[in-house]
């Protein structure tokens, strides 16, 4: 109780003595809370949205340490697996156009796929298909053509005993991207540009392989072994082939603002019908995962990690309130996700 009284006395004094607007005082208080919660161990950009508008944001560290380029609000970060929610909404868009059904089986589109006659598109969206593929089986392709799909189909495995059980396997969304290409007669790249980037007039969103192969783009850093403090000594080395291999699952760089506008727009019915949003992102298992998002009480959430980047989003189901954290410093055990939960719990709610 004493803490609450103290807070309101500070606000009252600010209004009466120096005539500072209440909103500015609250924003300053939240900024202090953010700095306390991050414990000055955060690299990246953190943004809080309330009622559809940017309320607070904090950026820390370097996008490019050798060139001393600092992270800022419009910095683009690899969003990794958060991209799956975009692939999911593009699938539902094709459902609305009657080009496919969630009950369609995989073999309708890829007859040679193992277990294809038993696996539905809905199960693939939910990660309950029984399909799996080792990361070591990734092959080097330099275009988004069917070579990626053919390769994944040839090396992936199907376990009927695991069908209906949640198992996070990105190959599901690689195949969904291939299905999108078949039914739309367009490349996945074109669909994202047309239905997402152009629709929302995004200025800070690019496919990874579209960015220049130079030190000018945001660099992803890894935590060095036994490191006790932040160090920029280990930039992640990646290839153009790796950026292609993540077809439909983790190829996009985005700013926090662009990511919010896309997910907010999806929730508000600007990509698919509003009534179909909860159907797409409905819980497909005890994990709560469905369509690229985890369905939680009052919230959707998603995380991404890899290549020296981490990302997380918590957004209300009406799209109005959100916390988004994008980082170019990959800590172990998804620490950015834990940070997102703390910000959501202590500030946003």
Image (cartoon, helix red, strand yellow):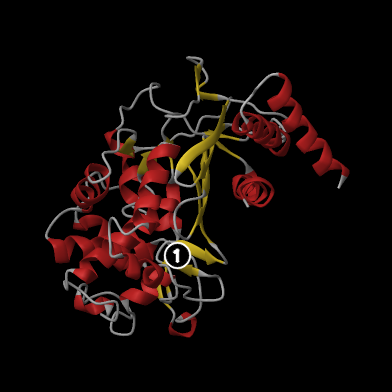
In x, y percent, where is residue 186? 14, 55
Q: Is residue 171 above or below residue 202?
A: below
- Classify mark 1: helix, strand or loop: loop
Name the foreground residue: 300 vs 246: 300
Q: Is residue 247 above or below residue 116?
A: above
The image quadrant of residue 147 is bottom left
Outermost front residue: 16
Question: Along the horizontal axis of the image, is 128 left or right of 32?
Answer: left
The residue located at (40%, 44%) in the rendering is: 259
Q: Residues within 10 Å of mark 1 (few under 14, many from 20)?
A: some
Question: Along the horizontal axis of the image, is 222 left or right of 157?
Answer: right
Outermost right residue: 2
Name the foreground residue: 171 vs 320: 320
Outermost left residue: 185
Pointer 1: what residue? Answer: 169
In x, y percent, where is residue 36? 73, 35
In x, y percent, where is residue 260? 42, 45
In x, y percent, where is residue 204? 34, 33
Question: Along the horizontal axis of the image, is 290 left or right of 103?
Answer: right
Residue 41 appears in the rendering: no
Question: Along the horizontal axis of the image, is 112 left or right of 59?
Answer: left
Q: Is residue 310 above or below residue 320?
A: above
The residue located at (46%, 75%) in the rendering is: 284
Name the foreground residue: 170 vs 321: 321
Number of marks drawn = 1
């Amino acid at each position: 109780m004493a803490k609450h009284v103290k807070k309101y006395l500070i606000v009252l004094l600010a209004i009466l003595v120096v005539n500072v607007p209440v909103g500015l005082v609250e924003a300053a208080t939240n900024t202090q809370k953010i700095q306390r919660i991050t414990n000055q161990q955060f690299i990246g950009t953190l943004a809080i949205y309330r009622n559809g508008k940017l309320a607070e944001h904090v950026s820390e560290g370097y996008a490019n340490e050798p060139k001393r380029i600092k992270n800022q609000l419009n910095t683009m970060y690899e969003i990794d697996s958060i991209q799956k929610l975009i692939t999911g909404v593009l699938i539902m868009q094709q459902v609305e156009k009657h080009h496919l059904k969630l009950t369609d089986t995989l073999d309708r589109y890829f007859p040679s796929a193992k277990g294809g006659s038993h696996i539905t598109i809905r199960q693939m969206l939910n990660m309950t298909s029984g399909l799996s593929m080792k990361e070591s089986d990734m092959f080097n392709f330099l275009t988004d053509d069917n070579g990626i799909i053919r390769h994944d189909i040839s090396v992936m495995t199907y376990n009927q005993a695991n069908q209906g059980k949640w198992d996070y396997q990105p190959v599901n969304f690689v195949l969904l991207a291939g299905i999108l290409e078949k039914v739309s007669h367009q490349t996945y790249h074109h669909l994202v540009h047309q239905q997402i980037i152009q629709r929302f007039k995004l200025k800070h969103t690019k496919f990874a392989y579209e960015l220049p192969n130079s030190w000018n783009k945001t660099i992803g850093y890894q935590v060095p072994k036994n490191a006790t403090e932040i160090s920029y000594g280990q930039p992640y080395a990646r290839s153009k082939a790796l950026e292609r291999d993540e077809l439909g699952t983790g190829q996009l760089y985005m700013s926090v603002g662009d990511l919010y506008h896309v997910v907010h727009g999806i929730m508000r019915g600007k990509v698919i019908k509003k009534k179909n949003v909860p159907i797409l992102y409905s819980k497909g298992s005890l994990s709560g995962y469905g369509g690229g998002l985890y369905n939680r009480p009052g919230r959707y959430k998603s995380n991404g990690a890899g290549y020296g980047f981490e990302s997380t989003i918590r957004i209300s189901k009406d799209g109005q309130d959100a916390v988004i954290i994008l980082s170019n410093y990959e800590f172990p055990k998804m620490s950015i996700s834990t940070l997102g939960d703390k910000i959501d719990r202590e500030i946003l709610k």
